[in-house]
Image: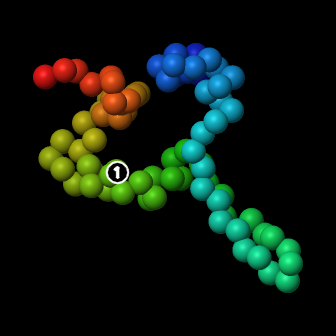
Amino acid sequence: TVELLAGMCGTDVLGYVTEGPGLSAYALSDGTVYRTYVTTARGLEPAMAYYALLDRTPRGRDESDTIPLWVRRHDEYEMS
């Protein structure tokens, strides 16, 4: 749920849904700016080189069907 995901990110629902990754491309022609491309969420995977690298390893991303646990903040990893 959105509430669960927001809590995992250390924010509230409003903070979680108002910010997110995105990629846009613009073109300037004769003084007019055109937005020629926009993508968010799953459409950004081609720009994330680490996905392609992890997908080629024996265990892939090694994540569950629900939450990508291999991505953590620097202070969320277990101490060895």
Q: What residue would you read off at disc 1?
A: 51
State the residue at coordinates (35%, 35%).
71
Looking at the rendered structure, the secondary structure element under dot 1 is: helix
Q: Residue at x 70, y 68 (%)?
A: 26
Q: Nearer the viewer, residue 79 or 18?
A: 79
Q: Residues within 10 Å of mark 1 (few under 14, many from 20)?
A: few
**Residue 38 to residue 27: above or below:** above
* Side of 21 relative to 75 (left or right): right
Front one among 37 and 15: 15
What is the x, y in percent for residue 31? 86, 78
Please tell me which residue lies in front, 19 or 55: 19
Location of residue 36 (image quadrant): bottom right
Q: Position of residue 18 (x, y in %)?
A: 68, 32
Q: Is residue 28 visible?
A: yes
- Quarter of the image holding residue 15? top right
- The residue at 50%/23% (across/down) is 9
Residue 17 spot, x, y in % from top left: 65, 30
Q: Position of residue 73 (x, y in %)?
A: 38, 30
